[in-house]
Amino acid sequence: MKSVNYRSFIKRDYKLRESANKTFVKLLNRRQIVLATLSLLVGLTVVSALVSDDSEAAISEQALALPNTEISTRVVQQLKLPIHKQDPRISALAVKTKAAPAKQVAQKRIKVRKGDTLAAIFSRNKISARDVYDIIALGKVTKGLRNLRPGQHIRLSFAEQGKFTGLVHEITKFKSLQVNRSAKGYSAKQVVRKPNIRVAYVNGKIRDSLFLDAKKAGLEQSLIMELAGIFGWDIDFALDIRRGDSFHVVYEEQYLDGEKIRHGNILAAEFVNRGRSYRAVRYAAKDNRADYYTPAGKNMRKAFLRSPVDFRRISSRFGRRHHPVLNRTRLHKGVDYAAKRGTPVRATGDGKIIHRARKGGYGKTIIIRHGGKYSTLYAHLSSYDRKARGKVKQGQVIGYVGTTGRSTGPHLHYEFRLNGAHRNPLTVKLPSATSINKRYKKDFLNQTRGLIAQLDGLRRIEIALAP
Ligand SMILES: [Zn+2]
């Protein structure tokens, strides 16, 4: 273990980067605009090509009794009441639904307060306790009205002379409960709105870090983390990425009434790291949860995480010439991650802690054995996690970055050994997790062909635009 003297280099890297960046940004701007415009065009074709299930078309439309409500179309899924056949009320209920509702003249939208109940809201709006009772008596379908959450909204409808005619309980943006009163009594149904899925596409080039550049490209933080999660088995996003690396992401966005509500899943993605392309597609075999696979059907997951530290916590970034990991080619047998004291350190694989004590120049050190062949070492820790004893899971926090032992500043020293011999943690070939089951291989290839063709198309455009 050599004492580490890369801090000065890190500082120098930062200066280089800053000044280099400014001109770089200017140079890139015009091209990026062209790229962005093209991406948009491509995105549109992607949308039309990929949206197989046009959710709106699949929805049976139904006019509602309340003309002024926001939910005017796209009523989905008439709620089935549970106890159907035995209960005489149910057949009556079906009739009730068909009965013409009272004409509504006024509507009031109420925000549920902390500690509010339907009874309290009704009382404040001069609706009788009898109505509360009748509505709750409809059973399971109105269960949500018994557990109102603060911040939710309820729309009350009234006819002439303030006669209460029904309500809409806005449960989520996608789900609401409608209670209507007719001459024959109350009826209730749940209305579920399906979001419109649009497929979006984002690409970008790395100039600073995955986090900053993906954000600039327009990816939300949660999507960036998903992207890093998909490729984190192959690429160390803290130390291994370079300026000029690029990424393409095809993902879903959910819309209601033309408004984006949230993003959905990443469907396909590509990351080009130092000229090498990594691709992933999302696939769920029947009854199984979705996962990401290479185009050949290998699971993206590996037995080891590439990096023991969350890439966002790393304070050193790549420079133009000086990589912060200076020591790895000399006597040094591992990788150093410069990060703030206290930054969590994760076990890179499932295993068993076989050493958890000071170890000479390494300072406070944890060594984990993973099966018979592999072991990993984490040094200079400031402290160990309390729960890090015996068996540990992949990704579990085992300790915290420090500067114990022979170390000039807070950093994690990480080693990876195969059959006792040191391997470069950044480049060692890691054992793969399970591949796709043979039974599903054909289905997998059929389902993912389109996505891979999209990635090919997007890549071609990028290459055509390259100077
Ligand atoms: Zn080191």
Image (cartoon, rainbow, N blue to C red):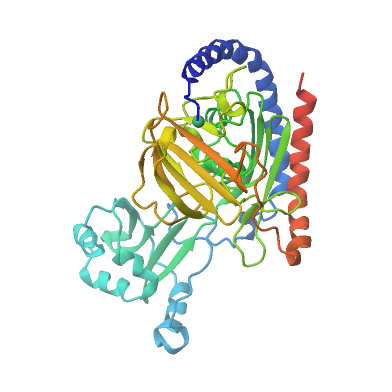
Instruction: Provide residue 229's location: percent of width, then percent of height.
Output: 56, 44
At x 70% / y 43%, what residue is drawn? Answer: 279
Position in image of residue 323 (x %, y %): 58, 22
**258 w.r.t. 387: above or below:** above
Compared across the picture, whether 232 is left or right of 460 comes to left
Residue that appears at 46% across and 26% down: 315
Classify residue 118 as left or right of residue 407. left
Q: Number of labelled discs? A: 0
Residue at 45% over, 52% down: 353
What is the quadrant of the C terminus in the image? top right
Give the quadrant of residue 452: top right
In screen coordinates, is 160 left or right of 423? left
**Horizontal side, residue 422 vs residue 103: left or right:** right
Give the percent coordinates (x, y) of residue 270: 68, 39
Q: Answer whether residue 261 is visible to the viewer in this image.
A: no
Q: Position of residue 269 (x, y in %)?
A: 66, 42
Q: What is the residue that sits farthest to the front in this orientation?
A: 360
